[in-house]
Image: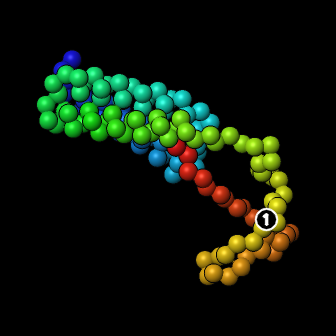
Amino acid sequence: MSDFLLAFLAGGVLLASVAMWARSIKRVEIPDSRSPFVIAWFIAFSLGVIALLGDPGWLGGLLAAMATFGSTFLLFTVAISKQKLGAEAIRVGDTIPGFSALDENDQTFDSQSLAGHPVLIKFFRAHW
């Protein structure tokens, strides 16, 4: 297999996995296991390094370097993120603790004003 093809494949694996991850985030369907993504990023990294060790040409080298850098960044962010639920985490159906915050008009909003009304409060935390 040519080094350029390996570089192209590395970029494709990285791009496809990032697109799938972005799609799941957009739908707020964060997967419970990041293992398939980690495997894909490791494959992209490996293919990129193998391509760079050969002679992929300038375009292949650029693709391989981007795939290697991108997958290294994503693997690093997964390695340093400890996103585990604590025992005090709020679960679906739980009563929310009292809080206050600013709304879109810079007015103070108090959670107690929601008492007796069905409410959906959605907190989004980025997942790498």
Residue 44's place in the image compared with 24, above or below, is above
Task: Judge whether residue 9 can be spotted in this image.
Answer: no
Check the picture and name the quadrant holding the N terminus.
top left
The residue that appears at 20% across and 33% down in the rendered structure is 61
Residue 20's place in the image compared with 51, above or below, is below
The residue that appears at 77% across and 48% down in the rendered structure is 89
Residue 21's place in the image compared with 1, above or below, is below
Q: Is 124 situated left or right of 58 in this image?
A: right
Task: Judge whether residue 70 can be spotted in this image.
Answer: yes
The quarter of the picture where residue 63 lies is top left
Asked which colour scheme the image uses, the reply is rainbow
Give x and y (percent) for residue 33.
59, 33
Give x and y (percent) for residue 115.
85, 70
The residue that appears at 16% across and 37% down in the rendered structure is 59
Q: Is 86 situated left or right of 50 in this image?
A: right
Give x and y (percent) for residue 12.
31, 34
Q: Is 12 situated left or right of 84 in this image?
A: left
Q: Secondary structure at mark 1?
A: loop
Nearer to me, 80 or 7: 80
Marks counted in the figure total 1
The residue that appears at 36% across and 29% down in the rendered structure is 45
* Mark 1, other Cα within 10 Å: few <14 / some 14–19 / many ≥20: few
Residue occupied by mark 1 = 118
Q: What amino acid is at disc 1?
A: Pro
Give x and y (percent) for residue 41.
42, 31
The quarter of the picture where residue 113 lies is bottom right
